[in-house]
């Protein structure tokens, strides 16, 4: 049964990581349905995200290696610091700071009380509506080349909101980008690039914590084999979603995701109220 659950959760992670609908919320909900009374856990979520972020690395390989290469050369004076790739490297570093600091400061709350399905449902609805507002009123002409340092920090703060299940990392960053006037494709692209250091970092930190807990005799809900399978599945599904989502945002709004978030949030309220789901 663990293997079937792992495959399903890997598919869910791959489908939802890059869409503005919160992958952590869906893993939390589907995990509760598949394993009543059990929660796959925040560390499971972090580890499986390594699969989807590897898909980002593969898809944006040329962009990422160009940014890293130019940034490293600038440190030794072999590349102009005004190079857009160097600037993008510094912006991604700046934007990664808030989620790292807040993740470490509120680690206990993230792993416990903030995983309540009441909070998840509320965040799905509230931030879904905010995303819809940002997509409607935001101007549509800015590109990443015009991003300021202040905007880079705001992007990072929006990403940090995703520490609360239901907010959505991609949803938060895309929402911030739209409010600041970036086009849908540019907001989506930067959301993917900004995620790489933060999500990879949390994934490998999750691996470290899992090894520590295992050595201390604490049993994980799913074993290492199923977790590895879920990670591999999430990579394949995630790559396909990246391709489809970037094509989608070229011509479509985020309205379908807004209504989906509201509907899922309301459904969770009903299931919690009737006792079908347990909040923690």
Image (cartoon, helix red, strand yellow):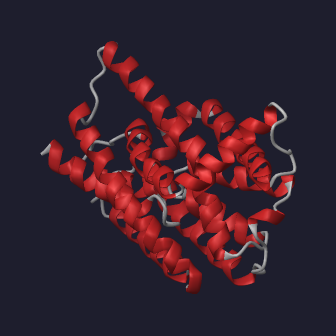
Decide if residue 225 is on the left or right side of residue 176. left
- Indicate the quadrant where residue 168 lies: bottom right
Decide if residue 38 is on the left or right side of residue 97. left
Q: Nearer the viewer, residue 252 or 99?
A: 252
Can residue 29 be seen here?
no
> Compared with residue 251, is residue 94 higher up or lower down, i.e. above or below?
above
Decide if residue 261 is on the left or right side of residue 229. right
Decide if residue 22 is on the left or right side of residue 44. right
Tally of marks = 0
Residue 72, percent from left and from top? 72, 36
> Compared with residue 16, is residue 248 higher up or lower down, i.e. above or below?
below
Residue beneath the point at 22% across and 52% down: 7
Can residue 9 be seen here?
yes
- Indicate the quadrant where residue 176 lies: bottom right
Residue beneath the point at 33% across and 13% down: 215
Residue beneath the point at 44% across and 24% down: 208
Residue 160, percent from left and from top? 65, 48
> Compared with residue 271, is residue 101 higher up or lower down, i.e. above or below?
above
Residue 102, percent from left and from top? 66, 37
Q: Nearer the viewer, residue 41 or 117?
A: 41
Residue farthest along the left direction in this orientation: 1
Residue 20, percent from left and from top? 53, 66
Residue beneath the point at 40% across and 60% down: 239
Residue farthest along the top direction in this orientation: 216
- The quarter of the rendered structure image containing the C terminus is top left
> Compared with residue 250, is residue 110 higher up or lower down, i.e. above or below?
above
Residue farthest along the bottom direction in this orientation: 251
Residue farthest along the front direction in this orientation: 78
- The quarter of the rendered structure image containing the N terminus is top left
């Amino acid at each position: 049964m663990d293997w079937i659950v792992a495959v399903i959760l890997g598919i869910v992670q791959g489908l939802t990581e890059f869409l503005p609908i919160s992958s952590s919320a869906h893993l939390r909900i589907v995990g509760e349905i598949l394993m009543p009374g059990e929660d796959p856990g925040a560390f499971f979520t972090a580890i499986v995200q390594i699969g989807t972020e590897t898909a980002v690395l593969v898809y944006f390989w040329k962009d990422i290696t160009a940014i890293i290469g130019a940034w490293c050369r600038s440190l030794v004076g072999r590349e102009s610091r005004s190079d857009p790739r160097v600037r993008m490297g510094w912006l991604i570093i700046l934007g990664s700071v808030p989620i790292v600091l807040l993740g470490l400061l509120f680690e206990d709350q993230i792993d416990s009380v903030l995983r309540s399905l009441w909070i998840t449902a509320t965040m799905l609805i509230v931030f879904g509506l905010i995303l819809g507002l940002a997509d409607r009123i935001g101007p549509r002409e800015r590109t990443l080349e015009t991003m300021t340092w202040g905007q880079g920090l705001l992007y990072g703060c929006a990403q940090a909101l995703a520490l609360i299940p239901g907010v959505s990392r991609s949803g938060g960053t895309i929402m911030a980008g739209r409010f600041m006037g970036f086009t849908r494709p540019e907001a989506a692209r930067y959301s993917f690039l900004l995620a790489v250091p933060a999500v990879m970092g949390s994934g490998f930190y999750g691996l470290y914590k899992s090894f520590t807990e295992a050595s201390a005799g604490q049993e994980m809900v799913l074993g290492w084999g199923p977790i590895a399978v879920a990670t591999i599945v999430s990579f394949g599904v995630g790559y396909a979603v990246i391709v489809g989502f970037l094509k989608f945002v070229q011509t479509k709004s985020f309205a379908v995701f807004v209504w989906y978030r509201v509907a899922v949030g309301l459904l969770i309220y009903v299931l919690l109220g009737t006792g079908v789901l347990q909040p923690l």
